[in-house]
Image: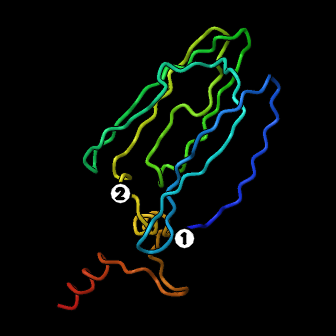
Amino acid sequence: MAGEKLPIQLEYRPTQSQVLEDSQIYVRLITGKQCAREIKIDYTANVQKCHIISDKSKIEFPCLPETECSEVVLQLTNESNKNYQFEVVPPNPKVSGLIVNPTVKPLPAGKSTLVSIKYESAFRDYTYWTSKDLFQPEEKETAPKGIAVRNKKLEARIKLEKE
């Protein structure tokens, strides 16, 4: 509701000199069966030079029909003399529609690699109801203990024999 405050604590211990940067995180909260809220969370972060450089600073996915998907390929380059291993922890694909490949890959010094980010446009209209459908457990048709599952071929054969 209006005026609500959510306490968040983050801790970071930098090894290089500190440069502070202010920004905001945009969050969409599903708050009930029929409503969602969008909030902005202000944060201040210590920024340090990263030796892994991307060829794109912003990724945008176009608005597509529900059955289509869009893919962006990033080139990550290690500009340092150290070998790194990068790891991406993407959000749940059932919720976000984002699929990142590869998620873990070694990145040797002075080399580069490609990372694919795929977006399925069915998730652009994410609501409480779509969330409920996605996370509902699958119901398997099982017969109660001691009762056999229906055999249609056997039933048809018995029916023919009776006639």
Question: How many numbered callouts?
Answer: 2
Element assignment for label 1: loop
Q: Quadrant of the N terminus?
A: bottom right
Disc 2 + disc 1, Cβ < 8 Å: no
Residue beneath disc 2 = 125
- Residue drawn at x 49%, y 25% as measured from the top left: 57
Number of the label disc, if any, that sits on residue 26 = none
Q: Position of residue 86 (x, y in %)?
A: 65, 27
- The outermost residue toward the left is 163
Which image quadrant is residue 3 in? bottom right
Between the C-alphas of marks 2 and 1, the distance is 22 Å
Of the residues shown, which amino acid type is indicated by label 1? Met
Q: Is residue 2 above or below residue 22?
A: below
Of the residues shown, which amino acid type is indicated by label 2? Asp
Q: Quadrant of the C terminus?
A: bottom left
Q: Is residue 19 above or below residue 110?
A: below
Q: Is residue 125 above or below residue 22?
A: below
- Residue drawn at x 46%, y 30% as measured from the top left: 58
Q: Position of residue 101 (x, y in %)?
A: 51, 33
State left or right for residue 46 relative to residue 135. Answer: right
Number of the label disc, if any, that sits on residue 1 = 1
State left or right for residue 50 relative to residue 94. Answer: right
**Which mark is first along the chain, 1 or 2?**
1
Q: Determine crowd level at label 1: few under 14, some 14-19, many 20+ residues with C-alpha closer than 10 A.
A: few
